[in-house]
Amino acid sequence: MRAKLRWVDPMLPLFMAVLQVTTTWGAQWNQPDRVQVDAVGVALLVAGPLALAVRRHHPVLTLIATLAVTFVFIARGHAYGPIFFSPVIAFYNAVVLGHRRVVWAFSAAAYVFFVVYTTWLAPVPSPGLWHMFAIAAVIGVILALGEFVRARRERLAEHERVVQEEARRQASDERLTMAQELHDVLAHNISLIHVQASTALHLIDDQPEQARTALTTIKQASKDVLTEMRSVLSVLRDGAPRSPTAGMERLEELIERSGLPVTRRVTGQVRALPPGVDRAGYRIVQEALTNVTRHAPGSTAAVLLEYGPRELLIRVTDSGGGPPGESLGGGNGIPGMRERAAALGGSLTAERHGQGFRVEARLPIPEIPEGRE
């Protein structure tokens, strides 16, 4: 399309100039009462098309120039017909480019000129009302076509803008999801590494075997965090292979790696979860256990998964065996969990529970199919 426009823009004025000059000679044979074209007439026939060369950058100026040339040509008594080609193109171009009020004003002026000239000034007056109606109809068709094309272009431009805006919004949502994934991965594994490193340093002299276990956990945690970071960041490279996203099927591995004494209980009918719920459930448990490791070291934790008819209940409770847990207003962990739940149409609460802390999330899941209860 752009290649075509590069040819059309410079060639159209030349083509219209040749067309108007050559076809005007033929029009004179059918209008013997009109003045024959002389050198000035030929110059006018060429001037109008040449003004079209700047029609895209100066549409109003082009319209004024073509109309002025046409008015002078007709007033000199030359033949009707081909001289109108240039102002027709100028009218259409100006409407399409959005100069509607100016175009309608000049359309009215052109109509008045032609009616006055053909009715009272022409050597041979034209027939009355029918001729006036024909002039108005031609001008109306030109303007209507221009308005239609302009409106269609505006709709296409608006549609493209909406598509681009939606693409930007989706990209922003993807970046936010990646940030949440990276936060959860880093927070959990770095906290685990910190706790296990502290344990190893404390036991390395007196209980080297337990220190070895802590160091093994650190090694595995560092490997896991690198693996999960590659999985999250691989979406930045087109065609990059992605590892399976962490989900509820890896919950047992997560609990074992946390280094906490955790009891896990599952009730209800276990069934496949939507990908978003599966990933969010895993991350919520991960963040809750990270908070226990960070703020209540030495405490015990209980993880409850309850598969209800329409929702999955996730409850993580710690005994508060260490310093007080994270407050509701501090850090990004709890707000991040709450945002995950809300994005799926669920809810999450985090509050004191006895001496400890409890995180409870309710995520919507598909209903149990009939006949499978």
Image: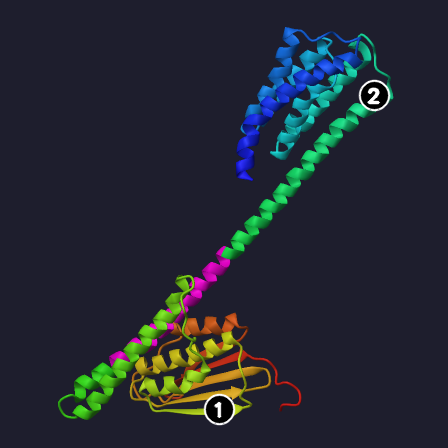
For the C terminus, the quadrant is bottom right
Magenta stretch: helix, strand or loop mostly: helix
Q: Mark on residue 266?
A: 1
- Name the spot of residue 25 as percent of width and height, x first: 71, 13
Quickly name the residue at label 2. Answer: 131
Report the magenta residues as a range: 168-195
Mark 2 burial class by Cα count in 10 Å: few <14, some 14-19, many 20+: some
Residue 320 position (above or below residue 171): below
State the residue in front, 205 or 55.
55
Q: Residue at x 83, y 21 (%)?
A: 131
- Residue 58 in view: no
> Depth check: 15 or 267 in front?
15
From the viewer's perspective, is 289 left or right of 360?
left
Under mark 1, the amino acid is Val
Give the vertical position of 264 relative to 191 (above or below): below
Which label sits in the foreground, 2 or 1?
A: 2
| Label 2 to label 1: alpha-carbon separation | 89 Å
Quadrant housing residue 125: top right
**SS of the residue under disc 2:** helix
x and y, in percent, of residue 81 in the image: 74, 19
Name the residue located 86 percent from the left edge and 22 percent from the top edge: 130
In this rendering, would 30 be left or right of 360? right
Residue under the point 66% across and 41% down: 151
Q: Amino acid at mark 2?
A: His
The residue drawn where x is 51% and y is 56% is 167
Return the residue nearer the eye: 328 or 99: 99
Residue 202 is left or right of residue 172, and the answer is left
The image quarter in which residue 88 lies: top right
Give the x, y percent position of residue 319: 36, 89
Q: From the image, which quarter does the N terminus lie in?
A: top right
Q: Position of residue 129 (x, y in %)?
A: 86, 21
Q: Secondary structure at mark 1?
A: strand
